[in-house]
Structures are given as C-alpha cells and as structure tokens.
Image (spheres, rainbow, N blue to C red):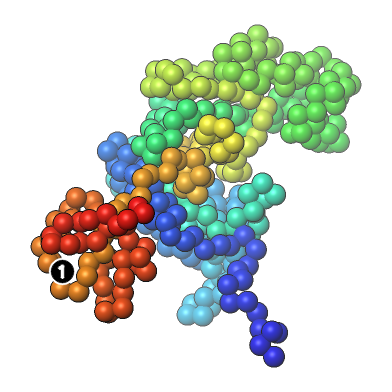
C-alpha cells in the first residue's frame, strides 16, 4: 500500500529546493549586490509576498496579470495575488507611503517572486529577484545609472566581462504608426519584425510602399551599438521614432561615460522584457553560456517617470566563480569556548559535538580543535 503514496520529495513543476552549499552561496551573492546598491544611496524596502489583486495588478502590474497566482483572503474575503515581479510593488510604495519623499527616489529590494508559467529555456516558476528603482527621474543619466550599477553589482560577485544589450520596445509601434499601417498588414509586419524574419519584413515592406522601406535596414542594424546608432541616424524615421532613436543615443553615451569598457549592443526593433517598459530597455549577459543575469529599463511609476533594474541571483549563482570552501573545525566535547570563538573570527566554521558519538568525519569537518589549535585531518 505504501507504494501508492506520493513521493514526499516531489515538488510542483518549476519549483525546487536549493541545498547546501548553494543556498548559502546565493544568499551571500544577494547581500554582496545589495551592498553595492546601498553604497550608491539606494534604500531597501520589503514589500509583502501577497497583496490585494486590485492594487497589485494596476499600473505597471497590469502587464503581469497572466503570470499572477490568485487566491481568496479568508479574512477580508477579497482576492489576493502573489507577486510575479517586485517592481510594481515598489512603484506602489513610492506613490503612497513615500509620496512626500523628495525625488529622485532611489529604492532597492530583494525577495522571491512566483509566476504561473516558466519558459522552455527558463522553466523555473519561483525565482529570487533583487534590484533597484529610480523614481521621479526622466534623464538619460538615470537609465545609465541603473544599467551600470547592475554591472558593478555583478562584478562584486566576481562576474566579469558582462555585456549590455539595449532594446527599444516603443520603436516598432512608432515605425508602424509612421508607415501608416493598420489592420492585417500591420499585424503581419509586427509579427515578422518580432520573429526577425528578414525575408518576410522585406516582402511586407515592399507591399506597404515607401513609408516602410527603411524597416529591413533597421532589422539588419542590430549588433554593436555604434553601427546600430549609425543606421538609426541615417534612416528617414518618423518623428516619434526619431525621438526614440535620439534618446537611445543619449542613454548609450551616458552609459559609456560611466563604463567606457562595457560591451554594448543595440537592437532597434527587438522587444525583450516585461510589458510595462516604455522607453530604453536593457539586458545584462554574462560570459559564455551563462544567459541573462538581469533586465531593466524605463517605465511609468504611477504618474512619475521611473527606471530600474532586476538582477537574477539564480543566474548569478551559475556565473559567479565558486569560492574556496571554508574550513570546518570539529569541536570535541569540552572544547575551549574562547579558542572556538577565535576560529570563527578568523572566518572558519566550527561544528560542536552534541553527543559522544559525533565525529569530525561524520560531521564533514576538515579540521579538529586540539589543544586550542585547528589541526587538519588526514586526507584533506
């Protein structure tokens, strides 16, 4: 009969346990990145895991409605949502409890988010997330600060050679508006741009006529920022699209002033990120195949201009170099407490025997305290 019972270690799809020593490593990475933010004047906030649905899914939170778990609050009998992203909560805090604090407001956060679905490449549904938000600033310098602080925070974890990919979520709609496309023709060209289908973009642009002739060139312009900016500068863009391109150039120039050696790419017609982004958006990539380490960009916080960055500690954990394991020193019964405290001050881990049967090997120790000195065990 016991064979029919579910495996107690089985978890729902997209959820997992993080075991030693990785759980401790992730926590250390989070605090190292948060310390970088704090040194730049970002003050930490801690929103609740759940909120009433009507507050959680307003403003920028509306873009996350289909990724939000919902449940009934047994106390108030109102629907609540589990956060799928922390940025909308920080926007709520800024607009309510911190509405009288002078702007620009710099806030940071760290916590867990839960999403209804993962993706094929990232199936996890519960994710650690940390980040910063700058609320009440519309300048290119604010976007540059958010992007470059992400690079600095990752460097504090030992992650070097980070690359920044800039995208312009509002560019494709502005281009399609400028081309005067509506209905089925607009939808078809928007899908082709989204899929990066160069042949289809060329065909549909030719059908649309001269107002859309520049679209294939912009699709091919994606790559190093200088080349992409030159293609944007040379294109005969509609006025709204021109403003987006000029802003992108200003933001990239501000980023380069802060981080001259940073590798920057630009994709003018790519949309990648959360649907509440309204201006320049960006993604941070680690070296090799580590994937996305963070995303950020400009959005509207209530009725205020805002920009921010979210970093993913689980991805940082894969990209960061593994630190040397701390020495684990076994403390036999009756060990000197002062000697043990001195070892901990030196950065060593002490593991005290709780019964006469406890042994150094059994407690996975590398050293043993003998006569007030940590002695390495043979074989370590």
Against 65, is 265 above or below?
Answer: above
The N terminus, quarter of image: bottom right
State the image quarter where residue 362 is shown: bottom left
Q: Position of residue 16 (x, y in %)?
A: 56, 62
- Seen as rendered, the residue at the extreme front is 378
Q: Is residue 7 visible?
A: yes
In this image, 73 relative to 236: left or right?
A: left
Q: Residues within 10 Å of mark 1 (few under 14, many from 20)?
A: some
Pick the residue in front: 255 or 261: 261
Residue at 36% across / 54% down in the picture? Answer: 379
Q: How many marks?
A: 1
In this picture, is 204 found above or below 289? above
In this view of the protein, which residue sits in the foreground, 309 or 58?
309
Seen in the picture, residue 279 relative to 371 is either above or below; the reply is: above
Outermost residue on the top side: it is 234
Q: Position of residue 269 (x, y in %)?
A: 68, 27
Residue displayed at 80% across by 28% down:
197
Residue at 27% over, 79% down:
355
Residue for point 68% across, 12% down: 235
Res. 27 in view? no
- Seen in the image, is 344 located left or right of residue 284? left
Q: Position of residue 83 (x, y in %)?
A: 52, 59
Q: In the orientation shown, which residue stands out farthest toward the bottom?
A: 1
Of residues 102 and 2, the one nearer the viewer is 2
186 lies left or right of 145:
right
Write down the residue under mark 1: 335
In the displayed structure image, the side of residue 83 where residue 148 appears, left or right: left
Label 1 sits on a secondary structure element that is loop
Say which quarter of the image contains residue 156.
Answer: top left
Q: Percent position (x, y) of residue 42? A: 32, 42
């Amino acid at each position: 009969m016991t064979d029919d019972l579910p495996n107690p270690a089985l978890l729902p799809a997209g959820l997992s346990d993080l075991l030693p020593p990785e759980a401790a490593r992730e926590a250390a990475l989070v605090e190292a990145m948060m310390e970088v933010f704090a040194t730049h004047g970002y003050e930490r906030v801690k929103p609740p895991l759940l909120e009433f649905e009507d507050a959680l899914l307003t403003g920028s939170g509306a873009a996350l409605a289909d990724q939000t778990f919902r449940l009934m609050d047994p106390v108030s009998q109102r629907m609540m949502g589990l956060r799928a992203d922390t940025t909308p909560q920080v926007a709520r805090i800024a607009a309510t409890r911190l509405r009288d604090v002078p702007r620009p407001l710099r806030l940071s956060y760290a916590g867990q988010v839960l999403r209804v679905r993962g993706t094929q490449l990232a199936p996890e549904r519960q994710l650690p997330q940390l980040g910063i938000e700058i609320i009440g600033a519309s300048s290119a310098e604010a976007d540059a600060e958010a992007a470059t602080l992400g690079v600095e925070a990752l460097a504090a974890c030992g992650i070097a050679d980070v690359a920044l990919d800039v995208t312009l979520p509002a560019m494709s709609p502005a281009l399609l508006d400028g081309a005067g496309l509506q209905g089925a023709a607009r939808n078809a060209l928007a899908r082709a741009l989204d899929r990066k289908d160069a042949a289809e973009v060329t065909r549909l642009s030719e059908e649309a006529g001269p107002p859309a002739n520049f679209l294939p060139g912009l699709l091919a312009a994606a790559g190093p920022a200088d080349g992409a900016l030159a293609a944007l500068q040379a294109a005969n863009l509609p006025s709204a699209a021109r403003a987006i391109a000029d802003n992108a150039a200003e933001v990239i120039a501000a980023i380069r002033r802060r981080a001259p050696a940073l590798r920057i790419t630009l994709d003018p017609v790519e949309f990648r990120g959360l649907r509440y982004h309204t201006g320049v958006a960006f993604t941070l990539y680690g070296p090799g195949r580590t994937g996305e380490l963070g995303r950020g960009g400009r959005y509207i916080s209530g009725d205020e201009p805002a920009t921010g960055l979210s970093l993913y500690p689980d991805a940082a954990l894969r990209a960061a170099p593994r630190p040397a394991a701390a020495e684990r020193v076994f403390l036999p019964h009756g060990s000197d407490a002062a000697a043990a405290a001195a070892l901990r001050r030196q950065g060593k881990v002490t593991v005290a025997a709780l019964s006469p049967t406890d042994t150094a090997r059994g407690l996975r120790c590398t050293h043993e305290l003998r006569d007030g000195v940590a002695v390495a065990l043979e074989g370590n």
